[in-house]
Image (cartoon, rainbow, N blue to C red):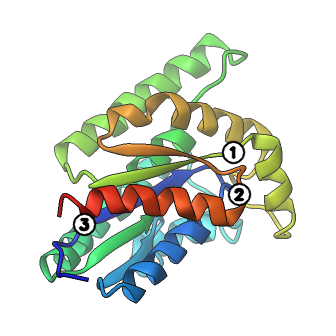
Amino acid sequence: MSERAPKFIVFEGIDGSGKSTHAKSLVDRLMARGIEAVLTCEPTRTGEAGKLLRRMITGEVPPLTGDAMALLFEADRLDHKYWIRDMLRSGVTVVSDRYELSTIAYQATWSLSDPEEVRSEAGRKRSLLRRIQRHYPFTPDLMFVMNLPVEEALARVGNRGKTDLYEHTKMLEQAAHYYRTSSDTTGPHVYIDARQPQALVQEAIDKEMEALWANW
């Protein structure tokens, strides 16, 4: 395979949608085809903010309240963006398990059954996060949004054992709605039906990657 310019690829979706599995699988396939690639994730596993977030999400320490939790995700991402930039500059394609959409999907969403004050506060927080993200722009070359019904996602999550801070019905329903309705505002993206067998999902991802490679 001829040499190609590095790209930034993101996988988004609710917990249990298979995004982590397919992000890793894509990196393996890229490497097998001679394209240097690296897998990363958010929250990060090496950044101090990311490590603290992971301890909060798993319940090891109490989560922050109000805007603080959402802003900690953004702080972790800001540091992460510099790392991604450096990888791309060195010729490495970066595949990330979660990125900007995740923070809004899990930190600033609401349902129609929520009181007006809850929806208003979530809307204010969403505007805040979008302003921060626009101030530090770094758009993926392609984003895969893994779509899966919440009931199936919860069944998959349950099979993993202990759930985390965000793996409950209301949160996943709100996040899934945001992914369905807001992904088209964030740059090049593709919706993937994650209900399909893993081999078919992989085939759909590879088809989109081949179209992207044609433009490299």
Using the image as rendered, state which of residue 154 and residue 216 is in the foreground.
Answer: 216
Residue 16's label in the rendered image is 2
Measuring from the top left, give residue 110's x and y in whole percent. 61, 26
Three-letter amino acid code of the residue under disc 3:
Lys
Q: Type of residue at label 1?
A: Leu
For image coordinates 32% across by 72% down, the residue present is 94
Q: How many residues crowd mark 2 within 10 Å: few (<14), some (14–19), many (20+)?
A: many
| Residues at circles 1 and 3 in contact by the CB criterion of under 8 Å | no
Closer mark to the observer between disc 2 and disc 1: 1
Q: Earlier in the sequence, mark 2 or mark 1?
A: 2
Secondary structure type for disc 3:
loop
Q: What residue does disc 3 label?
A: 7
Marks 3 and 2: in contact by CB < 8 Å?
no
Counting labels gives 3
Q: Is residue 61 left or right of residue 152?
A: left
Q: Is residue 161 left or right of residue 114?
A: right
**Residue occupying image coordinates x 62% and y 38%:** 176
Secondary structure state at the residue bearing disc 2: loop
Residue 30, compared with residue 205, is above or below; it is: below
Marks 1/3: CA–CA distance: 26 Å
Q: Quadrant of residue 175?
A: top right
- Contact, CB < 8 Å: mark 2 with mark 1? yes
- Would residue 61 appear left or right of 86 to someone viewing this image? right
Q: Residues within 10 Å of mark 3 (few under 14, many from 20)?
A: many
The mark found on residue 148 in the picture is: 1
Of the image marks 2 and 3, the number of the one nearer the N terminus: 3
